[in-house]
Amino acid sequence: MVIVLFVGIGILLGIVAGLVPGLHINTIAAFFLASGNLFSAFSPIALASCLVAMAIVYSILSFIPSILLGAPDSENVLSVLPGHRMLLDGEAMEAIKITAAGGGIALLVVIGLSGIILEWLPGLMNLLKDKMFYLLLFVSCVGIAFERNKFWAAVIFAIAGIFGLITLNGFENEVVFPALAGMFGISNLLFSLNENIRIPEQIKSKITLGKVELIKNSLLGTIAGAVVGVLPGIGGAQATFLVQQLNPKQGAKEFLVAHAAVNVSNTLFPLFVLATIGRTRSGIAVAIKELIGQGGLWVLLGTALIAGIIGIVLHLKIGIYLAQKLGDLKKESYRNLVLGVILFIVGSVFALNGLGGLLVLLTGTLIGILPIILGVRRAECMGYFVIPAIVYYAGITYL
């Protein structure tokens, strides 16, 4: 009964974290650890289940602000443009349904294959770790090669990478949110203001993506999420970058399906890593290890399955409702909403990171504007994560 209660609390926390830009689940997990005395009377497995429920719901619902507001988080930065583009085409409801489908397929595949994953994971980790440097370097070059303006694509990728090398190691506070909010959020929102966009009425349509494409891209995202979920130094954002660079002709719908699968897969695989070799690959896994060590995997997977199904239902209900309301806004009301989102992001950055965070936000915004004015895909800004990861797997120490 206690576990059920804490799973419910975790679902509620996942809803809040998913819908509020800048509020990351790692922050909540850190609070759990810092408040150990407060929760000492409760079962550790119940607390761990709470964290898993929160993480899986967050991995699904965090697409809502990305699609409807253009406000990214650290895992969903690349979904901002395809999702927001579908919103401007009146297809936000389908975008919500697509992400629910991709996440749901990944959830069922990973948990359904959990026995095989546990058996093969240690060997797979050793194989991937040795090849990751070459894989990241290869997909980065492939992505730039598909750009029409290869020179500026390489320049933007390098600038974003240098920005990542500096900020990810040179600042005491967490600066991923202000950096990504600048590159993928505010830069995009400023152009929305400049173009005086009106949100069209949102079409109540079924998923128009074919079943084969839906399943194929879900499996692709699941595999990419698994790869980064078991390795140190990289995360869901890099997995999505891999998927996009290896398939640059991918449409918005296919991309969102794969991205949703990446999120869910990347949330689940650190649990397998913890259970098999006792190492942590996410903030949630660190907190779980502190609570229960390497045990309790099957309880946690059961929690993830139940919370994931509930999260998908909530994602559909909340996302479609908000998309419909957004489509009813007049042009001036939408302009005010965009201004409100920008002010909220700026205020959140200042509250969480102070003046240093605002400097990172401004720099990220300037970098994020470059692809728009130079005709380069915004994915090249993912050099922010990819170049530090390449440096890490090359064994180079910096800063």
Image (cartoon, grey):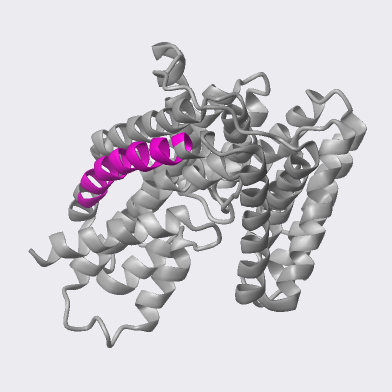
**Residue 159's spot in the image, x, y percent?**
85, 51
Q: Residue at x 52, y 39 (%)?
A: 326
Q: Answer with the quarter of the image where residue 151 lies.
A: top right
**Side (left or right) of 292 relative to 216:** left
Start and end of the magenta stretch?
A: 303-324
Q: In front here: 124 or 390? A: 390
Say which of 363 and 281 sits in front. Answer: 363
Inspect the magenta stretch and tell me whether residue 195 lies in it: no
Q: Quadrant of residue 115?
A: top left
Looking at the image, is 77 positioned above or below residue 173?
Answer: above
Residue extending farthest to the right is 151
Which residue is pictured at 19% across the width and 66% down the height? 46
Which secondary structure type mostly characterizes the magenta part of the structure? helix
Question: In this rendering, does residue 398 appear at all?
Answer: no
The C terminus is located in which quarter? bottom right
Q: Picture coordinates of residue 148 (x, y %)?
A: 85, 23
Asked whether residue 97 is in view, the answer is yes
Q: Residue at x 18, y 54 (%)?
A: 299
Left or right: 377 in relation to 43: right
Work out which residue is located at the far bottom of the displayed protein and give it.
Answer: 37
Q: Position of residue 328 (x, y in %)?
A: 51, 35
Q: Residue at x 45, y 34 (%)?
A: 324
Q: Quarter of the image holding residue 17?
A: bottom left
Q: Is residue 310 highlighted in magenta?
A: yes
In the visual, does 12 lie left or right of 155? Answer: left
